[in-house]
Image (spheres, grey):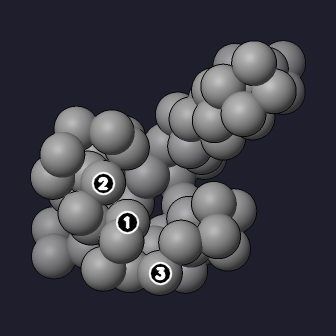
Amino acid sequence: MNEQTIDRLIDLEEVMRQVGMKKSKLYAEIKAGRFPAPVKLGSSSRWSERKVQAWVSQQTEQAAA
């Protein structure tokens, strides 16, 4: 299996670490439609690492423009 086809589901702590946001800000961005929503797995929430990384890339591109 190619590494590019694998998309890990990451927890809130990892998302906050990758994007540098606190929980309340992150959920406000999700509610406003500006950040990828989590996938619900029972009572847990997980995020697509690929979508989080794409969001980070988009923010970096916008900041450079």
- Residue visible at 66% across and 25% down in the picture: 62
Whole-percent x and y of residue 34? 33, 39
- Residue visible at 20% across and 57% down in the picture: 40
Q: Is residue 23 left or right of residue 16?
A: left
Q: Which residue is mark 3?
A: 22
Whole-percent x and y of residue 53? 66, 39
| Quarter of the rendering containing residue 20 | bottom right
Compared to 60, does 22 lie above or below?
below
* Tag count: 3
Give the number of the disc on residue 26: 1
In what element is the residue under mark 3? loop
Q: Tell me how far mark 2 sits from mark 3, CA to CA.
A: 11 Å
Q: Is residue 48 left or right of residue 42?
A: right
Compared to 50, does 32 lie above or below?
below
In what element is the residue under mark 2? helix
Give the number of the disc on residue 29: 2
Q: Tell me how far mark 3 sits from mark 1, CA to CA.
A: 6 Å
